[in-house]
Amino acid sequence: MKKVITVMIMVFSIVTLVGCGSATNNTPPAESSATDTATVQKTENRILKDSSDSSSENSTSDSGSKILVAYFSRAGENYNVGTVEKGNTQIMAEMIAEETGGTLFKVETVTPYPSSYDECTDVAKQEQNDNARPELKEAVDDFDDYDTIILGFPIWWGDMPMAMYTFLESYDFSGKTVLPFNTHEGSGEAGTTGKIQSALPQATALEGLAVQGKTAQEDRNDTMTTIQKWLSQNEIN
Amino acid sequence: MNQGSKRMMWKKSFKYFIDLLMIALFVLLMSNQYTGQLAHEWIGSGMLFVVLMHHWLNRTWYKALSKGNYNIIRMLQTSIDFILLLLIIAMMVSGILLSRYVFVWLQPETGMNSLRLIHLASSHWTVLLMAAHLGLYLSVFLKRIYRNEKQAIRVIFRLCGIISAIFGLISVMQLNFVDYMFLQTEFYQYSEDSFVLYMIRVVSILLGTASLTHLFMKLKRRIKT
Ligand SMILES: Cc1cc2nc3c(=O)[nH]c(=O)nc-3n(C[C@H](O)[C@H](O)[C@H](O)COP(=O)(O)O)c2cc1C
């Protein structure tokens, strides 16, 4: 019996050691960097707002086809970036609209998502398990006029946020070209191009662009370069 | 052959079949990026059944726990077995609660993110510990095979062990196993390998770790005698 107890103690000491290891490795993102980016963002907010306003008036690209940049993004507390005023995907969406002259459209739900990261993961998971179609706030004006839809979203639980499915099912995409991009924290595109294509059999879904959320938030120049390269590869611009 | 030993043979073969099935299912479970979520959940449910079967077939292990002497090797063996048991329970409970289809009626209101992290870390720990567990009992199995077969098979098995150890080690690095085990990365990274290559990687990690454990035990025994 003594030996059994010894073994048990061995087991538990190893288990707790492992537990400590993961606990110390789990340090929260540095506060200072989060506030730094927040101040940078404030100034950039204004600039980008101007550019997005002008781009919506002139949403025809050089090649003559009309482009819609529809994206979902969530501000607030998030993994790896601290608390942000502008979501990672939104930063990319604004850059893409600026580059292409496309119209920006933010996919927003009637019920906003919690700004706490943990709470948001619970809500997002619940919606995914329920295969929910959360109701959207606004509709795109004259959706039929656009030929190319650039679709942006974060990866939530290895998939698009369910609100994107509501969006895809709200319009007639037949004959349109869909170019997806996403931000993530490791999953990459997580099979979303395939999911978009099967949700929109009448449209042509092209290979998407996946950028790490932290990169989009904190290395804007790198992100811009990646976007420009990606757009010219897809002959949009 | 009399009736009793025939039944014994059947039971042994069935045990091996269950063990093999468990390894095969586990390889598929690790490949959930290719199988998709729905299949992952059904395979996981099948795994639950096979794991219970494995425990039932080896129930004498529990009875023998309080008997006999514990030398270092047995202590190590028993510790690994216990840790593995805890890991598998953690993996299965978190998996069931995270379910999108099969056990969706069990979904909790909150704590999903922690459950996801438990599932991510425990599954990657389980790969290595399951392989170590396999390695610790491998000598029993190998003795049975070597008894009836030619020397050639020994060479083949050793070669397999060496190759899988090398490729397994490379794969552990390339698939970022350690990052997941210690939650350095919180999100599973989709691999760009083909399904077949990915499965070969997981099998190599399992066999490689088992072989290294087996080798370690052999050296340990040799030093003692
Ligand atoms: C609810 C939730 C679930 C997430 N799930 C994943 C995931 O499965 N894989 C991943 O790589 N990142 C995941 N993330 C991280 C986000 O994809 C990443 O932070 C993204 O850049 C957020 O974009 P946003 O700021 O535009 O909302 C998740 C984030 C949240 C809030």
Image (cartoon, coloured by chain):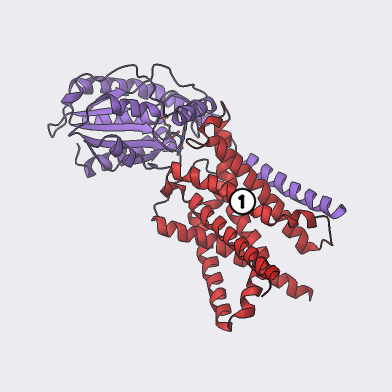
Which secondary structure lies at badge 1? helix
Q: Amino acid at mark 1?
A: Val
Name the outermost residue toward the front: B3
Residue that badge 1 annotates: B51
Q: Position of residue B48 (x, y in %)?
A: 58, 46
Name the outermost residue toward the left: A64
Q: Residue at x 86, y 52 (%)?
A: A1
Side (left or right) of A98 relative to A118 = left
Q: Is residue B154 above or below residue A221?
A: below
Chain assignment, label 1 = B
Q: Colour of chain A?
A: purple
Q: Which chain is the one coloured red?
A: B
Name the outermost residue toward the right: A2
Q: Is disc 1 surrounded by few (<14), some (14 to 19) or many (20+) residues within 10 Å?
A: some
A53 vs A206, nearest the viewer: A206
The C terminus of chain A is located in which quarter?
A: top left
Q: Residue at x 50, y 31 (%)?
A: A33
Q: Is residue A194 at least partly visible in the picture?
A: yes
